[in-house]
Amino acid sequence: MKKVKLLILAALAVMMSATSFAADADFPARPDTAIFVNDFAGVLRQSKVIDDSLRAFSKRTTNQIMVITVKDLGDYEPKMYAAELGDRWGIGQAKLDNGLIILIKPKTRDSKGQFALCPGRGLGGALPDVTCKRIVDGKAIPALKKGDYDVAVWAVLKAVMPICAGEISGDEATKKSSGGGGGWIWFVGIIAAVVGGVAYANKRAKQKQALIEANETPEERAARLAAAEKRKKELEAERKKREAEAAAAAAAGATTAKSVREKRQEEEERKRRNAQKFGGGSFDGGGASSDW
């Protein structure tokens, strides 16, 4: 009886070990260097060019966008596979979680194609699920249906890079893609109203001044001109005073500005150094995916 129990326990241990190995086997090993395009499925023709672009983007912003193609996702949903792989590889900076994964499982004769866009925790606010879904369905899937994986990747990168860099928000991207706008019309209307109002006020002031001059005595005219000259001198003195104060402030702030500039340069250099390697970012499974 004791031998039977030992055999059962041994069998269970083997099964658990095999299951664990199978789960790990679904995920490729993390590359030794910071390679931003990992084309395990061999479907990208421009992997080197894309990698160079993403490397430069990482140096500029510290955000790490990685393109990964795999032949099989196992039993995983695309988003969850991407999130698990991102956690295993540590894509993104550890304290910023600013990684973003573009995952492609190519379409084959026996299986559907699958595409996922999965941001790290730190980019989830800039790229919420609804924005990711719109980008996946609007940018990637049309090109993937034509079998052009490179075009799909470039289209997605063109959409997400400005958002990740903070140049536009997801909402702004939505407005631009939908052709929304019209606020400039109101702006032009306001400017026209202001200009018109100023012109009317100037015209009324000139009319009033002409009426005063036509009815004043020589003494009143002399007093008016003297007051105008005095006011002119006061305004000139005030202008010179402001210019002197501005020059003094500029001179005093020159040292501070230099210090701020040097600190900014040091921070940029630190970011570039950090961006050369993966920093241990984490993922929560957000983003979007679609099949084709």
Image (spheres, rainbow, N blue to C red):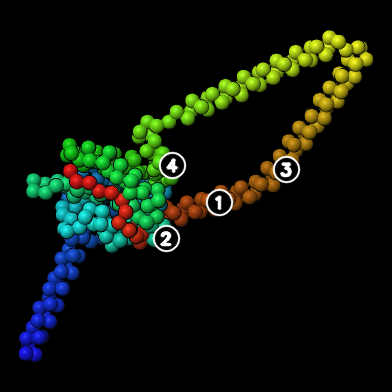
- Disc 1 vs disc 3: which is toward the camera? 3
- Disc 3 vs disc 2: which is toward the camera? 2
- Disc 4 vs disc 1: which is toward the camera? 4
Q: Can residue 53 be seen in this view?
A: no
Residue found 39% across the figure and 61% down from its top: 94
What amino acid is at disc 1? Glu
Sequence order check, earlier mark of 1 and 2:
2
Rate crowding at label 3 as few (under 14), some (14 to 19) or many (20 or more) other CA atoms within 10 Å: few
What amino acid is at disc 3? Ala
Position of residue 16 relative to residue 83, above or below, is below
Alpha carbon of mark 4 to alpha carbon of mark 3: how far? 35 Å
* Quadrant in which residue 200 is drawn: top right
Alpha carbon of mark 3 to alpha carbon of mark 2: how far? 42 Å
What amino acid is at disc 4? Glu
Alpha carbon of mark 4 to alpha carbon of mark 1: how far? 23 Å
Sequence order check, earlier mark of 1 and 3:
3
Do labels 3 and 2 touch, CB within 8 Å? Answer: no
Residue found 22% across the figure and 40% down from its top: 141
* Quadrant in which residue 245 is drawn: top right
What amino acid is at disc 2? Lys
Residue 285 screen position, x and y as percent: 30, 56
- Residue that numbered label 1 is attached to: 262
- Residue that numbered label 2 is attached to: 95
Q: Tell me the element at label 4.
A: loop
- Residue that numbered label 3 is attached to: 248
Alpha carbon of mark 2 to alpha carbon of mark 4: how far? 21 Å
